[in-house]
Image (spheres, rainbow, N blue to C red):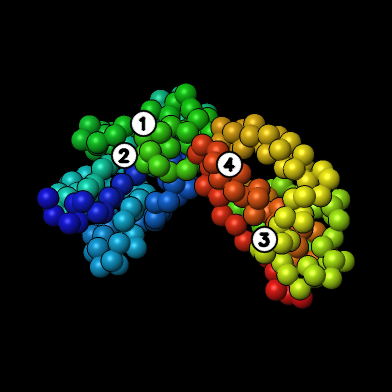
Amino acid sequence: MSEGVQGQEILIVTGMSGAGRSTVANALEDLGWYVVDNLPLPMLKTLADMADRSGGALPRIVAVIDVRGRDLFDDIQQTVLELRQSATVRVVFLDATDDVLVRRYESVRRPHPLQAQGSLLDGIRLERERLHELRASSDVVIDTSRYNVHELSTATRELFSDEDTPGLQLQVQSFGFKYGAPTDVDLMVDMRFLPNPFWETELRALTGVDPEVKDFVLGREGALEFLDNYVASLQPVLAGYQRENKRHVSLAVGCTGGKHRSVAMARELADRLAVMPGVAVTLRHRDLGRE
């Protein structure tokens, strides 16, 4: 097996209009795939060649392709054959029943691209006729008729995520309230209920990264009780985020200057949350070093 087959994966996502291509593409992007939407079919080989020369920077590519054109079935078959000489390629076809597609189009009040002067159902039937052979030859067919957006995202993750792919990306960041509270976070906690190491002469020049400050902060009354209870309260919250397909969550930990208490507590929270199944944690200190 060649190096390309081992390292590069390409998913071609296509299918009926209204069957959920955008939802699947978003779910795959959250899993770390590089997604290109509405890519002209002739450009797919060029994209694959660029990825092959990127030195592994783009190992997994998703190309969302609209193949309603009359002559594209033979083209896509040939393109897949060529790509499979150097990569693992799968064609994913999304489908749904006619009545479901009609309801989806009516809910967004948009015409079907192929209906022209006919009815919505005329456009759907014409597209189905054109895509019949492609559907039959696809590697994966997903009938989305009974899926809502969240369920389709979940099904996509189950089909295409690696076993070690985290279900949720959690960023923990410390900050200082005197520099302004962050506005782009999902959760926020305030560490100003703890005594400030700033007023301890031997700790003032240190930060929450230093062991002396960490020991001081975690040794204050209520600190460990807060950590235990807050981490326990986050477990059902983070699990719920995963069920609702919220893949990226940010938690901000604040104190007055973002130097001592918030830094120490953010690090401790990150360590504790990192052991939760399906959660990948990153840590940043927004205001550390500003004083």
Residue 107 falls in image quadrant: top right
Q: Amino acid at mark 3?
A: Pro
Residue found at x 68% / y 39%: 231
Which residue is under mark 1?
142
Mark before the other along the chain sequence, 2 or 4: 2
Residue found at x 77% / y 54%: 217
Q: CA distance from mark 3 to mark 4?
A: 35 Å
Residue 190 visible in this rendered orientation of the protein: no
Mark before the other along the chain sequence, 1 or 2: 2
Horizontal side, residue 277 vs residue 141: left or right? right
Horizontal side, residue 41 vs residue 25: left or right? left
Residue 131 falls in image quadrant: top left
Count residues near mark 1 (Cα–Cα under 10 Å), then give few for <14, some for 14-19, many for 20+.
some
Q: CA distance from mark 3 to mark 1?
A: 53 Å
The numbered disc on residue 211 is 3
Mark before the other along the chain sequence, 4 or 1: 1
Residue found at x 55% / y 45%: 274
Observer-nearest of 113 and 195:
195
Comparing labels 2 and 4, the label whose residue is closer to the camera: 4
The numbered disc on residue 246 is 4
Mark before the other along the chain sequence, 3 or 1: 1
Q: Are marks 1 and 2 in contact (CB under 8 Å)?
A: yes
Outermost residue to the bottom:
291
Count residues near mark 3 (Cα–Cα under 10 Å), then give few for <14, some for 14-19, many for 20+.
few
Q: Amino acid at mark 1?
A: Ile
Residue found at x 43% / y 37%: 157
Comparing labels 3 and 4, the label whose residue is closer to the camera: 3
Count residues near mark 4 (Cα–Cα under 10 Å), then give few for <14, some for 14-19, many for 20+.
some
Pick the quarter of the image with the C terminus.
bottom right
Which residue is under mark 2?
92
Local secondary structure at mark 4: loop
